[in-house]
Image (cartoon, rainbow, N blue to C red):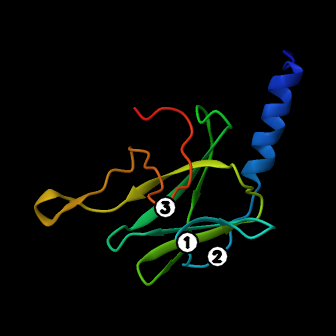
């Protein structure tokens, strides 16, 4: 049986712990990612989305660790609270919805979106 290096093993354990995180409903405001001293509330406005996935990444922003569906939709805001998230958590969104360009809708969950309310970006935009 192959053994992981200590660094790879630590990353694997961190990813496993992250995958066990439990998202709750959170609050629709304020918009963006907001640390409350215990966890992070994520809130994203979209009047026409049918589902929003929060994508969590490693510190470099290169490796996606987990996708979490935001569980609540209130007043056109998708939201969820992640008690295991901390300031500096690297994340993006995949937003599902209609692809109807004539109606102004171009949803594509294959595209990772930055948070329009983000206070900092990590890495290069491609």
Q: Quadrant of residue 25?
A: bottom right
User: Which sits earlier in the primary sequence, circle 3 or circle 2?
Assistant: 2
Category of crowding for the residue at label 1, using alpha-carbon neighbours closer than 10 angstroms: few (below 14), some (14–19), many (at least 20): many
Spatial CA distance of label 3 from label 2 is: 17 Å
User: Which sits earlier in the primary sequence, circle 3 or circle 1?
Assistant: 1
**Element type at mark 3:** loop
User: Which sits earlier in the primary sequence, circle 1 or circle 2?
Assistant: 2
Q: Nearer the viewer, residue 40 or 110?
A: 40
Residue under label 1, please give it: 79
For residue 79, above or below residue 10: below
Rendered residue at 73%/64% (across/down) = 22
Rendered residue at 44%/45% (across/down) = 112
Q: Is residue 44 left or right of residue 9?
A: left
Q: Is residue 110 left or right of residue 119?
A: left
Q: Quadrant of residue 15?
A: top right
Residue 23 screen position, x and y as percent: 68, 66
Pointer 1 and pointer 2: residues touching (CB < 8 Å)?
yes
Residue 9 screen position, x and y as percent: 85, 28
Residue under label 2, please give it: 26
The number of numbered badges drawn on the structure is 3
Spatial CA distance of label 3 from label 1 is: 13 Å
**Element type at mark 2:** loop
Residue 32 screen position, x and y as percent: 54, 65
For residue 11, above or below residue 94: above
Residue 4 screen position, x and y as percent: 84, 20
Q: Quadrant of residue 46?
A: bottom left
Residue under label 3, please give it: 117
């Amino acid at each position: 049986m192959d053994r992981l290096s200590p660094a790879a093993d630590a990353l694997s354990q961190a990813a496993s712990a992250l995958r066990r995180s439990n998202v709750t409903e959170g609050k629709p405001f304020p918009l963006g990612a907001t640390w409350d001293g215990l966890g992070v509330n994520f809130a994203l406005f979209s009047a026409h989305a049918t589902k929003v996935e929060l994508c969590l990444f490693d510190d470099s922003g290169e490796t996606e660790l987990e996708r979490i569906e935001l569980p609540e939709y209130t007043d056109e805001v998708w939201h969820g609270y992640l008690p295991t998230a901390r300031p500096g958590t690297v994340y993006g969104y995949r937003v599902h919805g209609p692809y109807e360009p004539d109606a102004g809708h171009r949803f594509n969950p294959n595209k990772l979106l930055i948070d329009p309310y983000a206070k900092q970006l990590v890495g290069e935009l491609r």
